[in-house]
Image: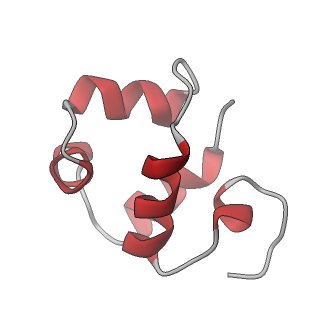
């Protein structure tokens, strides 16, 4: 599944893909595949991303516009 908001959130917070990958403790290429929708994002990673950006998983998934 592709989560367009991952790219937007990362840019809004001025993070590089490498910085987010380091936070998630994964390879940058793996994170890039998550961002482009080429690889499924494990729920554990979605939780960490929601914590990083101080938002909900539903917001990241585009199910709500409430941050």
- Residue pictured at 22% horizontal, 32% vertical: 28
Residue 34 vertical placement versus 20 (above, below): above
Q: Quadrant of the N terminus?
A: top right
The percent position of residue 29, horizontal first and vertical second, equals: 26, 23
- Residue pictured at 54% horizontal, 18% vertical: 38
The percent position of residue 7, horizontal first and vertical second, equals: 49, 49
Residue 24 vertical placement versus 41 (above, below): below
- Residue pictured at 58% horizontal, 26% vertical: 37
33 sits to left or right of 3:
left
The percent position of residue 35, horizontal first and vertical second, equals: 48, 36
Q: Quadrant of the C terminus?
A: bottom right
Looking at this view, name the residue that lies furthest to the front: 44
Instruction: Out of 63 and 13, give the one closest to the viewer.
Output: 63
Residue 27 vertical placement versus 65 (above, below): above
Colour scheme used in the picture?
A: secondary structure
- Residue pictured at 71% horizontal, 52% vertical: 61
Q: How many marks?
A: 0
Residue 54 vertical placement versus 58 (above, below): below
Instruction: Out of 66 and 16, give the one closest to the viewer.
Output: 66
The percent position of residue 47, horizontal first and vertical second, equals: 50, 61
Looking at this view, name the residue that lies furthest to the top: 38
């Amino acid at each position: 599944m592709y989560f367009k908001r991952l790219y937007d959130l990362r840019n809004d917070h001025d993070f590089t893909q490498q910085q987010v990958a380091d936070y998630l403790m994964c390879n940058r290429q793996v994170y890039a595949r998550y961002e482009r929708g080429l690889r499924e994002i494990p729920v554990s990673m979605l939780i960490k991303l929601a914590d990083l950006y101080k938002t909900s998983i539903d917001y990241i998934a585009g199910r709500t516009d409430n941050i």
